[in-house]
Image (cartoon, grey):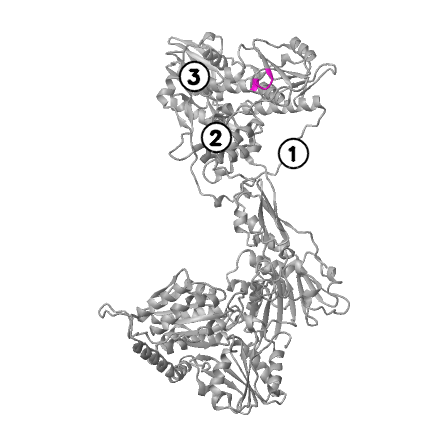
Amino acid sequence: MIEIVVHGRGGRGGVTLAKLIAGMYFRRGSYVQAFGVYGAERSGAPVQAYVRVDTEEITAHLPITEPDHIVVIDPSLITAAVASGLRAGGWLVLNSPLEPAAFAQTFPGCCVATLDANAIASANGLGSPALPIVNTTMLGAAARLFGLHVADVEGALDDVGLKGGNPAAARAAYDSVLTAAMPGKVVRVAPQLPPRSLGFLDDGVGGLPTIHTGQWASRRPHSRELAAVCSEACPAGNDVRGFLQAAARGDYDAALSLILETSPFPGICGRVCPAPCMAGCNRAQLDEAVNVREVERAVAGRGRLPEPGKPRRAERVAVVGSGPAGLSAAYHLGRLGYGVTVFEADPESGGLLRRGIPAYRLPRDILDREVDFVLRHGVDIETGHPVDRAELARLRRRYAAVFVATGLQGTPSLELGGACNGAVLQGLDFLERACRGEASVAGDSLVVVGGGNTAMDAARTALRLGARDVRVVYRRTRDEMPAIAEEVDEALEEGVELRELEAPVRICEAATGPTLVCRRMRLGKPDGSGRRRPVPVEGDEALVELPCDRLLLALGQSPDVSVLPKGAEIRGCRIAGEKEDAPLFVGGDLATGEGTVAAAVGSGRLAAARIHALLDGSETEEPQPHELAGPDVIALDRFPKTAQHKSAMLAVDERRRTFLEVRRGFVDEEGEDATAAEAARCLSCGACNECETCVAYCPEGVVCPAGGHRYLFDYEYCKGCGLCAAQCPRGVIVMEDCAEEVCT
Amino acid sequence: MSRAYVTGNHAAGHALAAAGEANRRARGCCGGAYPITPQTEIIEYLMAHAFARGSVVPVESEHSAMGVCIGAALAGARAFTASSANGLLYMMENVFAAGYYRLPVVMVVSNRTLGPPWNIWADQGDSLALRDAPWLQFYCDSHQDLVDTILVAFRIAEDLRVLLPAIVAQDGFLLSHTQMVVDLPEQELVDGYLPPLDLPHHLDFGRPRMYGGMTWPRDTQRQRADIQAAMDRVPEVLDEALDDFERSFGRRPVSAFSAEQTGDADIVVVACNTLAETAREVVRARRAAGERVGLVRVKLFRPFLRQALVDAVGPASRVAVLDRNHSPGSGGIFWNEIATSLRSRPDVVLQDYIVGLGGSDVAPAVIDGIIRDVGTRDTAADPIFITEAVA
C-alpha cells in the first residue's frame, strides 16, 4: 500500500488534489481511496487529505499517520511538523519558490522537492488574482516524483473535466520540479494537534477553542483609493466622482462645495463643457456614460452657495483678462485670502464666456451669477481697462503678482481673393455683434467656414437671427470636427446644413451675388493632431460653387503675446523676468491654447496655487501620478444596466426663433429626483462608497465599518480568502502577500 | 457492472437514481430534495440526473422533503430522499407519517452527530433517534455495501408482505466523502432486479378514499400490530431479495448480521459501519496471535433479528459491544438490543463500550484495549465511555 498525505488550507483544493492523485492510480487499475479532513472552520484552515493506493480492496478508514509521501500545497504550512511520520525515502513535495537546499535545516535527512506552484498557477490563470489555486499544479509535480507519467496527470484531470490552464500548469510543474536529498539524520517531530475544545459547560455554551484564524492567512486584503478616470480627465481638476457621489445622496450642498473647491463655474461648465469626463466614463462600457455635465448643471442650480471669506492678506494680485482663466485665478486667490483686481478691456466682464458663447447655450443670468460669485471673494474688477505692455509693467510695480490671461485674440484670415470683402466676417466678431444686438442677417444665405464650436455657434446664431439658410463648410468630415458632438447634432436638427470635405478656394462676384468657390477634399494620412489630413481633389470638376450673401470665418484663433514683456519666455505658467518686478504668470488659452472653459479654469487655479506658493514661501503640491481605476478593475457585470437621464430640449421650431436656452436640464419623473438618480449611476470607480459588498461576502465577519468610507480588516481573524477583493465591484480592495516567513 | 471511483454520496446517488429510473415503466419516481452536510452530494447528484419518468423536487426543509416523498409514494411513484443529523430531527414528524401510511420510501442517511455543539462528523445518534419509527434500518460498511443495500432496501420495502419505508445509513465523511473504487450497477440489471412498483393503496381517481383520518383506539392498535407483523416478515423477504440480488449481480450483500470467526470464539466484538472494518483488522491480528476472538457486524437494526444475533455470536462467553451512539441514562443503543437478544444466554458477560462519539477516530489500539478489558471481566459493568484518557 502507498499512503500519501496532502497538507493544504480549507477551500483551496487540497482534497481535490488527493482525489486526483488517487485518480491517476485508479486509471492504472489500482484500488484507491481519497478523503479529506473536514472541519467546521473550513476556509483557510490547515487541513489534511489522505490517499491510499493498493492492489487489494482497501478497508481502512482512519487518517494516515506514517505516510510514504507528503505534499504541502500552501507555503505557509511548511514547518518541521508537516513532515511528521514521513517514512524513510519518501518525498516531501513543497510549494515554494525556493530551491530544495533552502530546507536543509527544516527537514534534515528528507528527500525534498520544490516548485513555485503559485507562480505556475497564476501564469495559467488558475484561481483568482486574489488567490491562486495550485492543486492541479502540485499534481504534476507529484506525478513526476511518484514515477507516474504526464499521460496519467492529463487523464486524471480529464476524468473530472479539468481543462485549460489545469493540464498546462500540471505539465509545467512536471517539467520544473526540483529535487534534492537533505543531508543529516531525520528528526522526528510530533504532529501539530488542533487545540482542545473546552468542556461544554466550562465557558458557557459552545466550548470551541479560540483560534486566531488570521495566522492561516498567506494574503491579506487592503483598501486603496484609485484615481477616477473622470476626475483625472477633468481639465478644471474637479473631483467628479466625489460630487457625483454627494449628488447621488441628494446632498447638493456638499456636491456644490466639492466642485467649488476647484471651479467657480459649475453652472457654466455644466452647460458648455465638452465633458471629457464622460468620454472616459467606465459606465460607457456597461450602458451609457453618466451624464456628468447635466448633473453638474443641476448641482449648480440646487446647491446653496457658501458664504465667501474676507481678504486676510496684505498682498494684492492683479489679473489681466476676465475670461474663465482670469476669473478662476481671481477666485482661487480670493479663497486663499488675497485681494485681487481684475482688469478687463471690454465694457463687461466674462471675456469669451460673454462675447463668444451665445445665450441659448449659456443664459446670461447664469453667467452673471457665477461671475458675481467670483467677485464676492474679495475680487474687484475694472472693466474698460485695456492692458498693454506698458500698463502691464506698471501693474507689476503696484501689485505683488500679476496673472495675464488675455485668451486668444488673433484671428487667421483666408486668402480668398479681393472680391466681396464686405461679405466676409470673422465668426467671433459676428457673435460679439449679435451679443450686442448689432448683427443683422435676416433673409440672408450664409456660409460658415470651420468645424469648431465657434462655427456651430455662429451658424446657429445666424439661424436665430432669421438667416434664410446656413451652410457649414468643413474640410474634413464630421468625425474630425472639434465642435462638441451634441452641438453639431443640435445645429443639424435646427436646419444647419453641413458640407463635409470642402475647403474654400476663393470668393467671387457672380450675377446673383457673392459666390464661394470650394474644392472637394478627401482624407489622407493623419497629421500631427492625430486627425486625418484633408487632401485636395485635383481637377475642375472638384470645384463647388456656393452662392451666399455672407461668409463667416471660424478658423480658430491664435494668442496675442504683444502684451507680454519683449522676449518673454513662458516657463510653464511663469514668465521669467526682472527680479525687482512682481512675478508674472500667464494662463488660459494665451498659455495653453486648450480652448475649453474647463481647461481655462484649471489653468487659473494652477496659477493661483503657484502665485500663493511664491508669495507665501510654501511649496506647491505637484500632482502625483495616480493609478487609474480603469474598466479592468471595475466589475461591470455586477451592476444592472440603466438608461442615462437626458436633458430636456427646447422644441426645434422654438429654437430657430429664440435665444432661449436649448437644453432645459433634467426633468424629474414622478417620485424620482432625476439628478440624484443619474448621479447614482456613477460606479464610484476606485473609491469606496460603502456599498458593503465586502461586508456581505466576508465569510468570517472580519470586515468592519469604521465610518467615513473606511473599513477595517480584523487581521487577527482574516483568513485571507480574498472573497472581499474578488467581490468588491469597484476595485478598492486588493490582496497583498503577508510578510514572507517560509522557513521556520 | 462499471467500475467507478466515486464518493459514498455519489455511489448512493447513483443507486437511488437507478432504482427510481427502474420504475419508469410504472408510475415513475420522485425525490424530495433538501441539502445538509454530509449528505448534500446525494441531493446534488439526484438534482443533476435527468429522469425518464420522474423528478426531484427541491423544497425549503427536510420536513417538506419527506412530505414530497409521502405525496409521491401515495401517487404510486418510487420515492426517495436523503438527510442527516438535525435535518433528520426536523423531518421526524413526516418520517413517522411515511411509515404509518405504509409507504415504501427509501432514505439514505449519512450519519452525523446531533448538535449542539455543532459537529458534522460521523455518529449514529441521528438515525437511531428514529429507533421507534416504523422504518427498516440498514447500516453499511463500504461503498459497495451501500449501493447494493439501497437496491435491496427498495426491493424489501416495496414487497407487499412488508410495505414499510427503509433507512440505509452510512458513516458521514468516512464513507460519504471518501472517494473509493466501487462497482456501480448498470440500469438494465437494476431494471431486472426491481419490479415496477404497484402500491396497493395508491391514489386513484376511480376509487376515492381517505388516508390517515381519525380512527378509534382499537384501529390504531390493529395498525401497529400489522406493522409488527410486517416487520416479522422481513427475514424471509430479505433472504429472497438477497438470493435474487446474487443471481442478478453476482455478489451477495451481507444479510442482517455478518459473523467472522465466532464459531470457536471466547470473545466476540459487535460493531457496525466502518467501526466494524477497523475491528475486523484487530480481530484478525488477535487471531493471528492465537487468541480466540470473533467479530459480529450488525447491518440490519430494524427489525432487529434477535435469534439471528444469538446465532451470529455463537458460543462466546464474553461479548464487547462498540456503540457509536448513546442513549442518555441507558447506554449504547445496540447494546440494549443485544442485551434483549441474549436473554437466553445469561452466562454471557455483555459489556458495552461507547466509542467514537462525535466522529472521533477509533484507532485499532482502542479496540485492542477493549478486547483486553472484556477478557478480564467476570461480570458486566455499566456501559463504559471510552475517552482519550482510557484509550
| Amino acid type shown at disc 3 | Thr
Q: Nearer the viewer, mark 3 or mark 2?
A: 2
SS for tag 1? loop
Q: Which mark is residue A624?
A: 1
Q: Which mark is residue A295?
A: 2
Q: Nearer the viewer, residue B255 or A452?
A: B255
Q: Name the spot of residue B116 as percent of width and height, x first.
A: 52, 65
Q: Are marks 3 and 1 in contact (CB under 8 Å)?
A: no
Mark 1 falls within which chain? A
Query: Which span is picked out in magenta?
Result: A374-379
Q: Residue A221, relative to residue A59: is it above or below?
A: above
Q: CA distance from mark 3 to mark 2?
A: 26 Å
Q: Residue A741, relative to residue A145: is it above or below?
A: above
Mark 3 falls within which chain? A
Mark 2 falls within which chain? A
Q: Name the spot of residue A130 as percent of width and height, x first.
A: 59, 50
Tell me what residue is drawn at x 66 percent, y 51 percent: A738
For mark 3, what is the residue? A461
Callout 3: 10 Å neighbours few (<14), some, many (20+)?
many
Q: Which residue is the extreme one toward the left?
A: B206
Q: CA distance from mark 3 to mark 1?
A: 43 Å
